[in-house]
Image (spheres, rainbow, N blue to C red):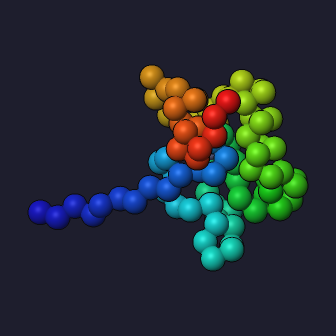
Amino acid sequence: MFFRRKTFYVCSVCGFDRLQGPLYKNGIPNVSLICRCCGFQPGYDDTELGYTYEAYRNEWIQNGAEWFREEEKPERWDLDIQLENINVFQ
Ligand SMILES: [Zn+2]
């Protein structure tokens, strides 16, 4: 039996490393992708609303770093460890 190996991507905003695809591919936003952790939607939050990754991240953290899909939040989740995925240290 064969299993297809799944590739995950890292969110540039929050460091969540289980994205189903890249936020951008060849410069084109993957608008169907919303980060389950920080809720960032490429092509909307940045292009439409004018957020940089950093600005979105800072606001998200200031608002309590709540999961967009709270039910998918792992039991032992650590924001600081996740942010290390994108070399952000608070
Ligand atoms: Zn994210």
Please give the name of the residue rendered at 77% of the width and 36% of the height, measured from the top-left corner.
Answer: 58
Residue that extends furthest to the left in the rendered view of this protein: 1
Q: Is residue 15 above or below residue 47?
A: above
Q: Is residue 29 above or below residue 78?
A: below
Q: Quadrant of residue 79?
A: top right
Q: How many marks?
A: 0
Residue 25 visible here:
yes
Q: Quadrant of the C terminus?
A: top right
Task: Give left or right: position of 90 versus 46.
Answer: left
Please give the name of the residue rendered at 71% of the width and 59% of the height, measured from the top-left corner.
Answer: 42
Q: Quadrant of the N terminus?
A: bottom left
Of 72 and 10, the residue lying toward us: 10
Residue that extends furthest to the bottom in the rendered view of this protein: 26
Please give the name of the residue rendered at 68% of the width and 63% of the height, measured from the top-left corner.
Answer: 31
Q: Is residue 54 above or below residue 58?
A: below
Q: Position of residue 54 (x, y in %)?
A: 76, 46
Q: Position of residue 32 (x, y in %)?
A: 63, 61
Residue 16 visible here:
no
Tell which quarter ligand 1 is in. Answer: top right
Of 41 and 59, the residue lying toward us: 59
Q: Position of residue 70 (x, y in %)?
A: 58, 30
Please give the name of the residue rendered at 59% of the width and 38% of the height, measured from the top-left corner.
Answer: 83
Q: Quadrant of residue 76?
A: top left
Of 84 and 18, the residue lying toward us: 84
Of 35 and 56, the residue lying toward us: 56
Task: Give left or right: position of 15 versus 90.
Answer: left
Q: Position of residue 36 (x, y in %)?
A: 58, 43
